[in-house]
Amino acid sequence: MSVWRRMLRRKCLCGALAVLLALPILGRGPAGASEFVAGIADLPLMPGFRELPGEGLLFDKPGGRIVEAYAEGEDQPRQRVMDFYNQTLPQLGWRRAGDLVFVREAEELKLTLSEEGGRLIIRFDIAPR
């Protein structure tokens, strides 16, 4: 094997290793968030919750987007959910405007918590303000 080929191979291996080592860091969103609500890159899903597919809607129009999404989690205290979103959403530019109400630019995000059969349900609503 020629010297050039060995050097190229070594550089490729080093580059690939660097990418693999960086993936866990680059894949992280705001503190504590590991996933986001489907189709909404700036709305984190609290760990321990799963999105309820087929239950929401998403309209993206020039005047702003309208989003309704739902997630459920078992054995999740309300206060922990409130604390998570009060800490996480400001990292994404959302400003707290009330209890579980946040605003950013021309949008308002409301979170509604309800209990159903031992599960805590989060309803996310985003609309132009």
Image (tube, grey):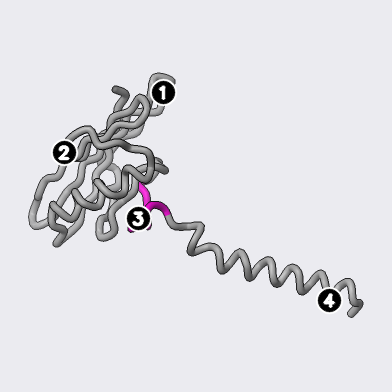
Amino acid at the residue labelled 1:
Lys
Which corner quadrant of the image does residue 34 belong to? Answer: bottom left
**Which of marks 3 and 1 precedes in the sequence?**
3
Q: Give the Cα separation between the discs numbered 3 and 4.
A: 41 Å
- Under circle 3, the secondary element is loop
Crowdedness near tag 4: few (<14), some (14–19) or many (≥20) residues, C-alpha within 10 Å: few
Which corner quadrant of the image does residue 13 belong to? Answer: bottom right
Task: Say which mark, if any, is on residue 33.
Answer: 3
**Which of marks 1 and 4 precedes in the sequence?**
4
Q: Which of marks 4 and 2 is in front?
A: 2
* Residue occupied by mark 4: 6
Q: Are marks 2 and 1 in contact (CB under 8 Å)?
A: no
**Which of marks 4 and 3 precedes in the sequence?**
4
Task: Say which mark, if any, is on residue 46.
Answer: none
Asked whether residue 56 is drawn in magenta, I would say no
Q: Is residue 120 above or below residue 13?
A: above
Magenta stretch?
A: 29-37
Amino acid at the residue labelled 2:
Asp
- Under circle 4, the secondary element is helix
Give the left or right position of residue 11, taking residue 85 as reference.
right
Q: Give the Cα separation between the discs numbered 4 and 1.
A: 53 Å
* Residue occupied by mark 1: 61
Q: Nearer the viewer, mark 2 or mark 3?
A: 2
Residue at image x 81%, y 69%?
8
Q: Give the Cα separation between the discs numbered 1 and 3.
A: 27 Å
**Which of marks 1 and 2 precedes in the sequence?**
1
Magenta stretch, overall SS:
loop
